[in-house]
Amino acid sequence: MHRQNLLQQLAVYQPLDAHEAGFLARTRQFVEHTPDCFERSHLSGHVTGSAWIISADRTQAVLLHHQKLDRWFQPGGHADGNSDINAVAFNEAIEETGLPPSQLTPLGHGIFDIDVHRIPAIPNVPAHDHFDIRYLFEAPTGIALPGNHESHAVCWFDLDAIQLMNHTESCHRMVIKTRQRFHARSSANTAGH
């Protein structure tokens, strides 16, 4: 079954809090009951993939200024039938940031974050839900981000500044997860010396 890989990842995923647990439950139910969940032609909603890209020194993350929505977001996009959402996130990150593929490193194979959000209606497309599956990636600190035509800008932002650029709870949650994951490792490494 083409949904099995994602369902297996969802089955073992541990959400940060009750709010994200609700997104997880909704996403699992949607994927289980929607054979064409990876197709944007499923107009009530579909699975999308996003990349949370952090710098090698763990102090910054990448946001792009989305041309259509006029807001700052992490790179990501539609699966268009591809059931390998990790690959979707990777490909969208390369396309939208302009990074060479060799400079973007996956950090683990599991899901990093889950969000369900409503996309407003546009001509010929009704309002619908994005069941967004996010994966964690690393790029060299300070590497240039050329971007592409879909964005006004692609920039590195200090983790402290992310919330100023994107006020959403989901973006804040990814900053919290980044700090928890890497601060805990840094503290453990320091204690071991």
Image (cartoon, helix red, strand yellow):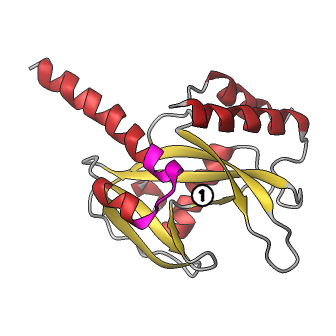
Q: Where's residue 82, x and y in %?
A: 76, 50
Residue 32 is covered by the magenta coloring:
no
Could you tell me what secondary structure mostly forms the magenta stretch?
helix
| Residue at (67% x, 38% y) in the render | 23
Left or right position of 2 against 115: right
Is 149 located above or below residue 142 in the figure? below
* Residue shown at the point (56%, 67%) measured from the top left: 95
- Residue 137 in the image, given as x and y percentages of width and height: 45, 47
Q: Which residue is at the far left? A: 193
Q: What residue sits 33% from the left and 70% below the top?
A: 144
Residue located at (71% from left, 26% from top): 8
Task: Give the amino acid type for the residue marked by disc 1 in the picture.
Answer: Asn
| Element under disc 1 | helix
Percent of width and height locating residue 166:
46, 63
Residue 102 is at least partly visible in this image:
yes
In this view of the protein, can residue 99 be seen by the observer? no
Of the pair 144 and 13, the residue shown nearer to us:
13
Whole-percent x and y of residue 40?
Answer: 82, 60
Q: Nearer the viewer, residue 107 or 170?
A: 170
Q: Is residue 186 left or right of residue 151?
A: left
Residue sitting farthest toward the top: 192
Residue that numbered label 1 is attached to: 91
Q: Is residue 172 magenta?
A: yes
Q: Is residue 183 above or below residue 189?
A: below
The tally of labels here is 1
**Which range of residues does the magenta coloring cover?**
165-173
The 10 Å Cα crowd at callout 1, few under 14, some 14 to 19, many 20 or more, is some
Res. 156 image quadrant? bottom left
Question: 179 left or right of 74?
Answer: left
In the picture, which quadrant includes the N terminus?
Answer: top right
Classify the position of the C terminus by image quarter. Answer: top left
